[in-house]
Image (cartoon, helix red, strand yellow):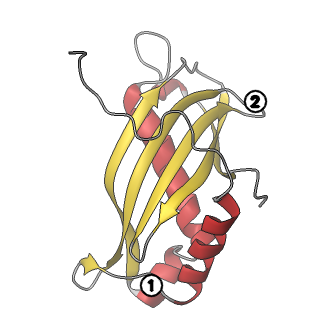
């Protein structure tokens, strides 16, 4: 992982059953792709299946915003790049961007807030141990990356 590059977390081909009547990726499947990218990030941070079982902790999505920037067609191979925008003791602020594999232009973006949860409650819990170390390392690696244009946007009509 480079300090100048988001983490590539997920890659997939766009399946025919994901395409809508307009001939492009159905809106719900953007979130599915971003969800798989979050799963891969969890694996990267040590919250994979065995990590969740050992710690009794997981991540829950608190909030998610999606920006649909360009159409994605059936058969395209896409990849998600993930940037950790910030974190505190219990939360991760993420930015996923969807790209045609090997290209720079974002096709869609998802800004998300995730909460670290003790599943026994369930209740929020601070990051600890190796997961905390990995969160801090990723945060430090991504600290110098520019803030993406879609971050912090709100939805509403003018006026």
| Corner quadrant of residue 72 | top right
Q: Quadrant of the N terminus?
A: bottom right
Judge by depth and name the residue closer to the eye, 130 or 43: 130
Residue 58, compared with residue 152, is above or below; it is below
Could you tell me residue 8's position as x and y percent? 69, 50
Residue under label 2, please give it.
103
Could you tell me residue 105's position as x and y percent? 67, 26
Mark 1 vs mark 2, foreground winner is: 2
Could you tell me residue 41's position as x and y percent? 57, 61
Q: Of marks 1 and 2, which one's residue comes earlier in the chain?
A: 1
| Corner quadrant of residue 115 | bottom left
Q: Give the SS element for disc 1.
A: helix
Q: Residue at x 37, y 33 (%)?
A: 28
Residue 62, compared with residue 140, is above or below; it is above
Residue 53, compared with residue 42, is above or below; it is below
Q: Quadrant of the C terminus?
A: top left
Residue under label 1, please give it.
53
Q: Residue at x 63, y 40 (%)?
A: 12
Q: Give the SS element for disc 2.
A: loop
């Amino acid at each position: 992982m480079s300090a100048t590059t988001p983490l590539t977390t997920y890659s997939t081909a766009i399946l025919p059953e994901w395409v809508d009547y307009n001939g492009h990726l159905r809106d719900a499947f953007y979130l599915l792709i971003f969800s798989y990218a979050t799963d891969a990030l969890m694996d990267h941070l040590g919250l994979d299946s065995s990590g969740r079982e050992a710690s009794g902790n997981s991540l829950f999505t608190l909030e998610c915003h999606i920006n649909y920037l360009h159409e994605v067609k059936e058969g395209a191979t896409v990849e998600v790049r993930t940037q950790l925008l910030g974190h505190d003791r219990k939360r991760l602020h993420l930015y996923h961007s969807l790209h045609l594999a090997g290209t720079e232009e974002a096709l869609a973006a998802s800004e998300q807030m995730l909460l670290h949860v003790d599943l026994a409650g369930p209740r929020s819990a601070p990051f600890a141990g190796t997961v905390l170390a990995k969160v801090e390392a990723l945060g430090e690696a991504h600290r110098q990356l520019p803030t993406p244009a879609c971050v912090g946007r709100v939805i509403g009509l003018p006026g």
